[in-house]
Amino acid sequence: MKKVLLMMVALFLTVAAFAQIDEPVKWSYAAKKISATEAIVLVKATIEPGWHIYSQHIKEGGPIATTFTFTPGKDYTLVGKTIEPKVISKYDDQFKMNIGFFENSVVFQQKVKLKAGAATVKGKVEFMSCNDRKCLPPDEVAFNVTVK
């Protein structure tokens, strides 16, 4: 009985060691001051080969769009909306529509007006990543970027 139990535990540990959590998107953040009172917050997604994330502009009935939510701050105000580069657009049979997405990497930009010389811009990004076999549940990542 002990041998069977020991073998089951060893088998479980072996399977657990080979289990892999998919995290195909890594996020990084930076800021670039463009004047004494304005800056651009850069939010970069680095995406593993074969995976993609979606545009901010997805029609209803499609996948979860990439969404930015910025925490209001006393040191800055947002100027306009978060911009994204040109998307790859393809027809998706599952959703029966053209869908815009990004592969490899993408940099989103948000302009901010500084009320003081420096600020820490905080927020979160919600996104959904997919490959040709599966989609992962939507994920949310918090960030903060110091503008000096």
Image (cartoon, rainbow, N blue to C red):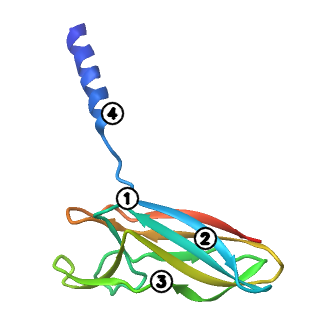
Q: Tag 4 or tag 2, which sits nearer the N-term?
A: 4
Quarter residue 133 falls in? bottom left
Looking at the picture, how far across and down is residue 118, in whole percent? 80, 74
Nearer the observer, 109 or 62: 109
Q: Tag 1 or tag 3, which sits nearer the N-term?
A: 1
Disc 1 on helix, strand or loop? loop
**For residue 108, side relative to residue 98 (left or right):** right
Q: Tag 1 or tag 4, which sits nearer the N-term?
A: 4
Q: Residue at x 32, y 85 (%)?
A: 60
What amino acid is at disc 4? Ala
What amino acid is at disc 3? Glu
Disc 1 target residue: 24
Q: Tag 3 or tag 4, which sits nearer the N-term?
A: 4
Disc 4 target residue: 17
CB under 8 Å between callouts 4 and 1? no
Q: Nearer the viewer, mark 4 or mark 3?
A: 3
CB under 8 Å between callouts 3 and 1? no
In this view, 40 is above or below 135? below
Nearer the observer, 31 or 19: 31
Looking at the picture, how far across and down is residue 97, in whole percent? 22, 86
> Label 3 to label 1, Cα distance in Å?
20 Å
The residue positioned farthest toward the top in the image shown: 2
Q: Residue at x 29, y 80 (%)?
A: 62
Mark 2 crowd level (few <14, some 14–19, many ≥20, 10 Å Cα): some
Disc 2 target residue: 123
CB under 8 Å between callouts 4 and 3? no
Disc 3 target residue: 84
> Label 2 to label 4, Cα distance in Å?
34 Å
Q: Residue at x 75, y 86 (%)?
A: 35
